[in-house]
Image (cartoon, rainbow, N blue to C red):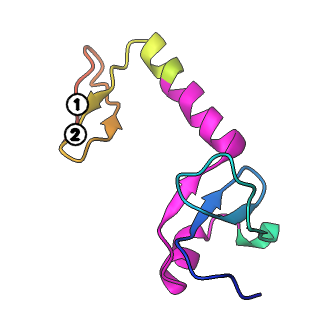
Amino acid sequence: MTLPSGKYAVGRGLFYSEIIEPDSDSTPPLMTLPPRYRSHEEELSSIYVLAGVQDIGAVKGFKAFWNWLKELFGFRPEETATGSARFVSNGTSNTLAT
């Protein structure tokens, strides 16, 4: 299948992956990949020089829920130098691992 020129990414779903336009939640996926591509999104993105891998659908919601649950039980998210949050506990207090 040939796609028109543009910027594309691999969407990591719960059961299957998709080829999507990055940062656009309102547009439908351009292509749905077979389940055998699940867990191979990074390789697919690098082989076809795509704009990376993004979580979509239930995976995005599950990760948000998991982060909320960690905060509820005392694991505090803190910003790293790259802007991503990491959760760490040393048994007595929660700290940031760098």
Residue type, label 2:
Thr
Q: How many labels does the image show?
A: 2
| Quarter in which the C terminus is drawn | top left
Residue 64 shown in magenta: yes
* Residue at figure coordinates x 75%, y 55% from the top left: 28
Q: In this view, does 71 lie above or below 59?
A: above
Q: In this view, does 80 lie to the left or right of 12?
A: left
Residue 87 shown in magenta: no
Determine which residue is flagged by label 1.
96
**Magenta span of residues:** 38-67
Measured as percent of width and height from the top left, residue 57 is found at 70, 43
Q: Is residue 24 left or right of residue 16?
A: left
Residues marked 1 and 2 touching at CB (< 8 Å): yes
Q: Is residue 78 left or right of residue 81?
A: right
> Which is in the foreground here, disc 1 or disc 2?
2
Which residue is nearer to you in this view: 7 or 38? 7
Residue 64 image-quadrant placement: top right
Determine which residue is flagged by label 2.
80
Query: Along the polypeptide, which appears first: circle 1 or circle 2?
Result: 2
Q: Is residue 14 above or below residue 20?
A: above
Q: In this view, does 86 lie to the left or right of 81?
A: right
Which residue is nearer to you in this view: 59 or 49? 49
Residues packed near mark 1 inside 10 Å, few (<14), some (14 to 19) or many (20 plus): some
The residues tagged by marks 1 and 2 sit, at their Cα atoms, a distance apart of 8 Å
* Residue at figure coordinates x 64%, y 48% from the top left: 56
Measured as percent of width and height from the top left, residue 61 is found at 64, 34
Q: Is residue 56 above or below residue 31?
A: above
Measured as percent of width and height from the top left, residue 39 is found at 63, 64
Magenta stretch mostly in which secondary structure?
helix
| Quarter in which the N terminus is drawn | bottom right
Residue type, label 1:
Leu
Measured as percent of width and height from the top left, residue 54 is found at 54, 55
